[in-house]
Image: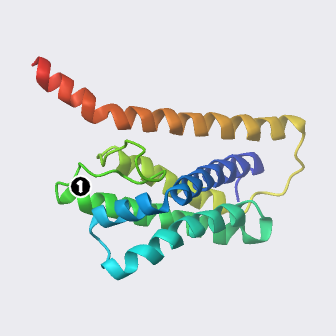
């Protein structure tokens, strides 16, 4: 059991990130299918259904996380999703394929595969597992609710900024090589 404030922050962060990822993918399902093809991990016949399944699973995990009786299932599903995404990225990095879009928040987000995505995603696996743990029983006060809200906003902003930095890594490396 963990403190309900930590649990609330973890649940909120994972739910927001999953919902945002699902919305971006659903807004450009054709592009997301193309991204899945680029990963070269699925038979062509599976690309279309998996392109639908992933955002639906992301929404389901997010919804399950914020409803007490399904919290464990939501945390488990979120952790599995992030672990599968991490494995897909790792396989393509091992193949030397860094030039494809990660597809993390839908296609054409400008984030190519990078080794930095692996620890980021492993952090999301751990955060998802934490979100699925049952919180300790204690009454929450106004400061606790403020702390949860501020914590969710801070972690989501940290995630957004880290994505920008990770996305700029290939350009930064190219500039370094150019000036050396």
Q: Is residue 86 left or right of residue 132?
A: left
- State the scheme by which the image is colored: rainbow
User: Residue tagged by mark 1?
Assistant: 93
Q: Residue at x 32, y 75 (%)?
A: 42
In this orientation, which residue lies closer to the viewer: 97 or 142? 97
Q: Is residue 150 left or right of residue 79?
A: right
Which image quarter: residue 88?
Answer: bottom left
The image shows residue 173, relative to residue 41, as above or below, that is above
Q: Residue at x 9, y 19 (%)?
A: 180
- Disc 1 crowd rating (10 Å Cα; few below 14, some 14-19, many 20+) is some
Q: Most extreme residue toward the bottom, as rendered?
A: 45
In this orientation, which residue lies closer to the viewer: 30 or 67? 30
In this orientation, which residue lies closer to the viewer: 102 or 31? 31
Q: Residue at x 41, y 58 (%)?
A: 31
Quarter in which the N terminus is drawn = bottom right
Give the image location of residue 154, x and y in percent: 63, 33
The image shows residue 23, relative to residue 46, as above or below, that is above
Give the image location of residue 164, x and y in percent: 43, 34
In this orientation, which residue lies closer to the viewer: 1 or 48? 48
Give the image location of residue 151, x and y in percent: 68, 37
The image shows residue 147, relative to residue 52, as above or below, that is above
Q: Residue at x 70, y 67 (%)?
A: 64
The image shows residue 57, relative to residue 2, as above or below, that is below
Asked which secondary structure carries label 1, the reply is helix
Q: Most extreme residue toward the top, as rendered?
A: 179
């Amino acid at each position: 059991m963990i403190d309900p404030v930590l649990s609330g922050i973890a649940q909120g962060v994972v739910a927001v990130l999953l919902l945002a990822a699902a919305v971006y993918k659903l807004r450009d399902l054709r592009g997301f299918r193309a991204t899945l093809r680029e990963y070269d991990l699925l038979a062509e016949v599976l690309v279309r259904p998996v392109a639908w399944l992933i955002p639906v699973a992301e929404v389901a995990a997010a919804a399950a996380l914020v409803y007490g009786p399904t919290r464990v299932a939501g945390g488990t599903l979120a952790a599995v999703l992030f672990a599968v995404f991490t494995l897909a990225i790792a396989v393509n990095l091992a193949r030397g394929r860094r030039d494809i879009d990660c597809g993390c928040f839908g296609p054409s987000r400008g984030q190519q595969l990078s080794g930095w995505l692996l620890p980021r995603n492993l952090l999301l696996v751990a955060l998802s597992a934490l979100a699925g743990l049952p919180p300790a029983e204690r009454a929450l006060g106004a400061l606790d609710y403020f702390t949860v809200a501020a914590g969710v906003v801070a972690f989501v902003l940290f995630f957004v900024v880290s994505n920008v930095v990770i996305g700029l890594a290939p350009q930064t490396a190219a500039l370094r090589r150019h000036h050396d």
